[in-house]
Amino acid sequence: MSEPNATTGLILNEPLLWERGKKGRRGFSMPAGDVPRNPLPAELTGDGPDFPDLAEIEVVRHYTRLSTWNFGVDTGLYPLGSCTMKYNPKINEKLAGLRGFAAAHPLLPSALSQGALRLMFDLERFLAEITGLDAVTLQPAAGAHGELTGMLIVHAYHRSRGKQRTKILIPDTAHGTNPASAALCGYAPVPVPSGPDGVILPETVEALMDTDTAGIMITNPNTLGLFEANIREIARIVHDRGGLVYGDGANMNAVLGIVRPGEIGVDILHLNLHKTFSTPHGGGGPGAGPVAVRTDLARFLPVPRVVEKNGMYELCEDHPESVGRMMAFHGHFGILLRAYAYILSMGPDGLKAASRLAVLNANYVREKLKDVLHAAYDGPCMHECVFSDQNQKESGITTLEMAKRLIDYGYHPPTIYFPLVVHGAIMIEPTETETKEDLDQFIEAFRSVIRETTENPGALKDAPTRCKVKRLDETAAARTPCLAG
Ligand SMILES: *Cc1c(COP(=O)(O)O)cnc(C)c1O
């Protein structure tokens, strides 16, 4: 390895603003007022905090330095992938800032919001086309909220058929939000163990699916980065016994333009626009979790729905079987706008190419690391590859320590200890945008960390040592959080 990506040279110390400044300094330079000063009466200002007096440059430097302490996808490769922060083309941000959209008021009458409504109408059509389903709601605020919407639709469907069911099948590899969303709708989650190859076997579903089970929630590709190859057979079993197939589409980044879930047995699917279709969302920013359904379930979608009448777009509440409203106004419109811009700028071929590259990059990393890190499953993966720390057992080094040491090499650690079914899991999702050179440098850094597990284990025990904040006691942070700042 020529040079690690990280350097310690210019990491500057940064005291709190309260510890800086000198009485009488000013943060602005404006002419003195030409009217008499008239301070607020003391009873209105009270004993407010004693704000520091700072010069403009002190404040500018303070915040600019703090901003360089952050690691983001604009700084370097981020192996958490689309699930947390794939690279989002800047053009989508620019378009989301267009004044006509950014300043539109949600209470404007439809006649004055034709552009925004048409964008929503068209986006619903694009997402229907991409998912192979028929009707879409853009309301849900994120993936988990999409799941809740989908489960309400499952609930409404069974009620409409005269008999409610009590359980729902959920694979053991599922994201934790799946059982939570099902439980919120009164369904008891029934875990479905995955087979030895990391995918669900039809016979397991056959044995669990009964007429008291409302359906299955299935993530495809699943959270192990594997395609649920038996999905059609599983869907047939669930449908034969009167259940519905809910697809968790959080991993659609692997299959855009390649697999349409509606064509392989999925009845309801949520998409995470903020994962797959461009929106920065690390740190809990807003997302969007549109839900697509097949035709006969469209009557249950949330209201209002965007409809077209004689070339005009309007909001329609007239859907008596709807599960109701899931969000105020139009959902997270700014996120919808980014997804719309992303889909149009990529086009069908571009979206397909992005997924193919995402899968290629993950398999490249997998192939280049599998002689030193234990690959949890044999054979090619989809958009993410899962390893474990099994090969490092003898050295006493764990997944956590390798992940922390990567920070010293200038990389954000990948997802660790998830999915839960792989002991000591290390999940790497490079995404489509990384170049071969950047992937090679990451791979080299990781290989170097693995060499250290035997040659210099002490470096891993203390890692990270080169960065501003050293190893944190994560348990203490959770048990005795310091919220005072
Ligand atoms: C991220 C994710 C979710 C939840 O989506 P949010 O948008 O974070 O609410 C659900 N399932 C899977 C597989 C995910 O990766």
Image (cartoon, rainbow, N blue to C red):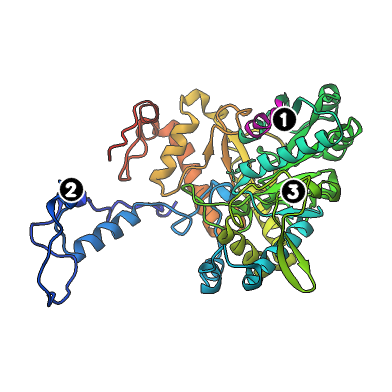
Q: Which of marks 3 and 1 is nearer the N terminus?
A: 1
Secondary structure under the numbered disc 3 in the rendered image: loop
Residue at image location 62% in from the left, 31% down from the top: 180
Which residue bears the numbered disc 2? 48
Q: Which of marks 1 and 2 is in front?
A: 2
CB atoms at circles 1 and 2 under 8 Å apart?
no
Which residue bears the numbered disc 3? 301
Secondary structure under the numbered disc 1 in the rendered image: strand
Three-letter code for the amino acid on which mark 2 is drawn: Gly
Q: Distance between the residues labelled 3 and 1?
A: 23 Å
Q: Quadrant of residue 334?
A: bottom right
Answer yes or no: disc 3 within 8 Å of ligand 1.
Answer: no
Secondary structure under the numbered disc 2 in the rendered image: loop
Q: Which of marks 1 and 2 is nearer the N terminus?
A: 2
Three-letter code for the amino acid on which mark 3 is drawn: Leu
Q: Position of residue 317 (x, y in %)?
A: 72, 55
Residue 202 in the magenta stretch? The answer is no
Labelled disc at residue 170: 1
Which range is magenta?
180-188
